[in-house]
Amino acid sequence: MANVEVIKAKLDEYGLRKGSKIEQIRVAAYCRVSTDTEEQLESYKSQVQYYTELIESRKDWILVKVYADQAITGTKADIRDDFMRLIHDCMVGKIDMIITK
């Protein structure tokens, strides 16, 4: 069984107190394709469009950003620039939820 580390959001940095109601959840999406073939690039565009439309269609969600890495291997996180930006933004409390495939 894998170990999972839970990193709690730093809500008090944004003026929220325990028990306060959050009107909108700050949502980010992450998209990635591993090659630059035409088929993969079309998949990449479709993913970005799908997640943008999904997040913007929800009144209880606010789009932070669609983070996306194109034609980059999935085996090494440190070379996926937008993935690393996504992790950083989560760590500093800018994102409440991530959706990805």
Image: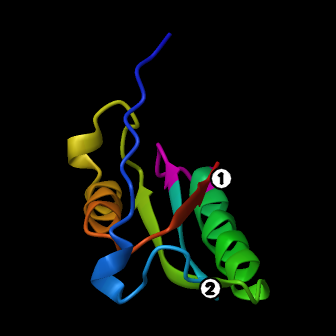
Q: Position of residue 26 (x, y in %)?
A: 53, 78
Q: Position of residue 80 (x, y in %)?
A: 29, 51
Colour approach in the figure: rainbow
- Which of 26/33 is in front? 26
Q: Report whether 51 appears left or right of 82.
A: right
Q: Which mark is residue 39?
A: 1
Q: Quadrant of residue 6?
A: top left
Q: Report whether 83 appears left or right of 95.
A: left
Would residue 9 be counted in the magenta stretch? no
Q: Give the residue displayed 76% in from the left and 90% down from the top.
A: 59
The magenta stretch is 32-39
Q: Quadrant of residue 42?
A: bottom right
Which element type, helix, strand or loop, lies under badge 2? Answer: loop
- Say above or below: 7 vs 3: below
- Which of 97/74 is in front? 97
The residue indicated by pointer 2 is 24
Which element type, helix, strand or loop, lies under badge 1? Answer: helix
Q: Give the residue displayed 54% in from the left and 60% down from the top.
A: 98
- Say above or below: 35 vs 23: above
Would residue 34 be counted in the magenta stretch? yes
Q: Earlier in the sequence, mark 2 or mark 1?
A: 2
Q: Position of residue 38 (x, y in %)?
A: 59, 56
- Which of 55/36 is in front? 55
Outermost left residue: 78
Q: Amino acid at mark 1?
A: Glu
